[in-house]
Amino acid sequence: MSADGSSSTAAVAERLVAPVARTSDGAVRRGWRRARRRPPALVGAAVVLLFTALAIGAPWISIANPIKTDWGQIRKAPSWAHPFGTDDLGRDVLSRVVWGTRVSMQAGVFAILLAIAIGVPVGLAAGYYRGAVDQVIMRLTDAWLSFPFLILAIGLVTILGPSLTNATVAIGLGATPTYLRLTRGLVLSTKEEDFVQGARALGAGDPRLMARHILPNIWSALVVQATVSIPGAIIAEAILSFLGLGVQPPTPSWGTMLNTAQQFLESAPWMAWWPGLAIFFLALSFNLAGDGVRDLLDPRDY
Amino acid sequence: MVDFLVHRVLISVVTLIVISLIVFTGVRMIPGDPARVMGGTDADSAGLEEIRQKYGLNDPIVVQYLRWVGLAIRGDLGESIRTRESVVHTVARKLPITMELAFLAVLVALAIAIPAGIFSAVRRNTIWDLVANTVSLCGISIPSFWLGIMLILLFAVRLGWLPASGFVPFWQQPFGNLQRMLMPAFVLGAGLAAVLMRQTRNSMIEVLSADYIRTAYSKGLARRVVIFRHAIRNGLIPVVTILGLQMGALMGGAVVTEQIFVVPGFGRLIVEAVFTRDYPLVQGVVLITASSYVLINLLVDASYSLLNPRIRIRGAAGER
């Protein structure tokens, strides 16, 4: 931060005069300055935004109908009309990859939201109240963690039946223990901080302490964890769909596309390239962006 | 240490009980009448009643649970609906194949991750470190099943060097077995290698800045000796723990890998069981997988406390 240290005294004075009004603006600018120092993270974030735009805008962007079959265009190599080629039913692979973004983003984001929605409150309660509640919750979490994620998802899908929603629920439940443990650990250390003890001394009740004093302080760690676990969830959805346990045809999804592609590796290898590349780039971008978010939210680096 | 182990074993037992409860409840949540599921679609009402009597489905749920656990402990997990073979036998037949795959995958992962992790820790912030980190980041981001498909495309379809799929037992054709296991083991090991490499790097960096390493340097030891005799011993301890915790991911990964390379192991078994709605088989496989995960990690912790005096002493002091 030496570059900022040399900024003029006028700027310092200005900040002193109007501290409140400038706070949020300053935070944004400071964030941007730090982000700019990390080009990989910026590229990652940009690609994530691009995929998000694709997911939302699929109906307007797609050049062809992703589920329209064309018997005259079966397994055609990439060309001007079909830049990514066509699949075994003559459907446009580019269009299917674009629509597949929707499924993947949806599954990844909602699964992690579910994990947060369950894991954070329960972890908060466990860490805050300790005692028997904590013991019971932690033993349940241990047991839950012993089911390898995919085995758990397979078990749940067996019970619930294969669909995108059920796959998302299975992935979310699989990721829940991570958030529960993380929250609990953070709460355990934050609870002992002076400002929390101070607020308690001033008469703040449990709900207020948790919501106003503890949660805002552990939030950034949770956001970082979310950024790095979304790519895992996206890959997980692709795996479940690949195994036939997720999205059902004819809805285009990267996993199901790869499943079909595997049967035509000799005659139509392009069917296997694009969906896999899409998963790879999206996951990589999330991971790069996640590293950036981690730096950005790290309070030690002010 | 005994205290630590006893505590650890008790926790594992509680975890196993909770696991059995989850699996038992899970199977009960399957929509439909279990008797109908077991009897198939052409069973009449008398047949269904007979099944209910035979399996005690009319008993209170607690009695049913206790009976199920009692049988499970004695190694009876029922029989597959489809093949009528006992679940334990079916699993025992398939498990060695998956264990071979997992073992080879761990070898591959360690062979890549440990040297790469140590190297990039020692050469921290050089171009080599950057390369190693980039490869590791890609390894985490690449979906293993797509990597498998791409390898088949390259080595089997294009180059024709390796068979795309299939399996022969090791004791029949050792070379043919390894030849067919090469790609699956690499695919399954790659993701693990990426995780382990990061862990090795971080923990080596931490160890290399420790006081005793500086002491070792200052008494004139060669860099090679310091790294390989002093740093590695402590640096690799966390890697072992991570390896234990990654066993779950490895078992999950085996399911997908076996699916792609048509390896007739445990993973293919469970996917087939799901599609044929073979509930006792799914139940048995899930129970066995979760229990073995608990036991593996218990063993990792136990070996840990034997190897690491700090844990040994802390355990003896009664701390947790």
Image (spheres, coloured by chain):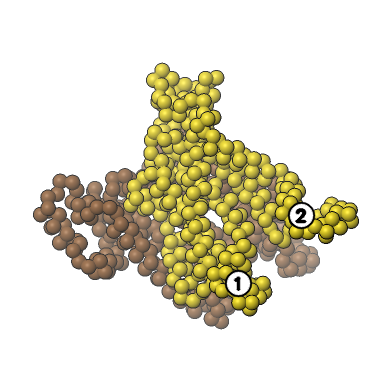
Q: Is residue A285 left or right of residue A121?
A: right
The amino acid at mark 2 is: Arg
Q: Residues within 10 Å of mark 2 (few under 14, many from 20)?
A: few
In the rendered image, the vertical position of residue B154 relative to residue B268, given as above or below: above
Residue A211, label in figure: none
Residue B225 is at least partly visible in this image: no
Identify the chain of the residue marked 1, using the numbered disc in the image: A
Which x, y percent locates residue A5? 85, 56
Give the SS element for disc 1.
Answer: helix
Point 19% across, 48% down: residue: B40
Point 49% across, 49% down: residue: A110
In the rendered image, the vertical position of residue A24 relative to residue A196, given as above or below: above
Q: Quadrant of the C terminus of chain A?
A: bottom right
The amino acid at mark 1 is: Lys
Which x, y percent locates residue B225? 71, 60
Taking the view exactly as shown, the residue that stands out farthest to the right is A9
Q: Is residue B31 left or right of residue B97?
A: left
Chain A is shown in which shade? yellow
Q: Quadrant of residue B59?
A: bottom left
Q: Quadrant of residue B210?
A: bottom right
Identify the chain of the residue marked 2, using the numbered disc in the image: A
Point 37% across, 49% down: residue: A157
Give the SS element for disc 2.
Answer: helix
Which residue in the structure is indicated by mark 2?
A22
Taking the view exactly as shown, the residue that stands out farthest to the top is A72
